[in-house]
Amino acid sequence: MDFLSVLGVIIGFAALLGGNFLEGGSWNSLANGPAAIIVVGGTFGAAILQTPFNGLRRAMSLFKWIFKPPRQKFQLGIKRVVGWARSARKEGLLGLENIAERESDAFSKKGLRLLVDGSEPDVIRHVLETDLIVAEQRDHDAVQFYESMGGYAPTIGIIGAVMGLIHVMQHLADPAELGPGIAVAFVATIYGVAFANLLLLPIANKLKSCIKEQSQFRELLIEGIIAIADGENPKAIEMKLSGYLH
């Protein structure tokens, strides 16, 4: 569990509700079911309309990264690569075949198989970097689902506010209802802006940071595998890859 994600959500909404309370507002003044339906439903609908099915499915699968992001263990990754290099030096590249079969990470397995097959370093780099770029682009396309919702939510909130004002204008003959009616109308605007800036856009940026870290880890693996293909000393490989440590 990512404690900072939970803490960020709590602080953001606590500041919003606490500020409203300190200004003399009540909790009920921000509670409006129709406004929530307009903003949340309209935002999701607009984002789903622009997103392909595969992108939407990937976006939903990435949602868990917000509170449980994949931790890339760079130190452990370096140790794994150095272990592969030592095995290759002792037993030759064919000695990596059993290691490749036991490898659970698909990206690492592919790199090891390319080594075992005796592929040239340039070929290995091209294949693995292509996989890296495609995977990174796929994940960034999925993140655009949350970014687009962050862009639509404030506009949908304004639409909800205008709809509320239309309802208020129908009661101009009763001045007692104008003030509360206008206040309720603008709740939709608050929902739209808060939904975008306290949840959706931060979610998109959090996912981008996770994607970036994952790509850096795979770059580490690529450099290590290429170094093995070039026959570099395991100690030299370890020193080279240490630059990826934070």
Image: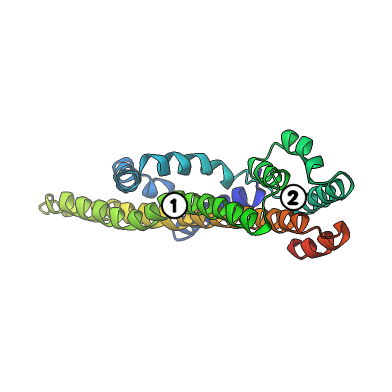
How far, Cα to Cα, is label 1 from label 2? 25 Å
Residue 151 in sight from this viewpoint:
yes
Q: Amino acid at mark 1?
A: Asp
Relative to 206, is 149 on the left or the right? left
Q: Quadrant of the C terminus?
A: bottom right
Residue 11: in sight, yes or no?
no
- Residue at 76% from the left image edge and 65% from the top image edge: 243
Residue drawn 33% across the image and 44% down it: 48
Of residue 146 and residue 24, the one placed in the foreground of this image is 146
- Which is nearer the eye, 52 or 12? 52
**Where residue 109 sits: x, y (%)?**
68, 41
Applied colour scheme: rainbow
The image quarter containing residue 20 is: bottom left
> Which structural element holds mark 2?
loop
Residue under the image location 46 percent in, 51 percent down:
143
Q: Determine which residue is flagged by label 2.
A: 73
Q: Name the amino acid, label 2.
A: Lys
Percent position of residue 64, x then y: 56, 41
Return the residue at label 1: 141
Residue 217 horizontal side relative to residue 193, left or right = right
In front here: 102 or 166?
102
Residue at 63% across, 57% down? 125
Vertical placement of 95 versus 158: above or below?
above
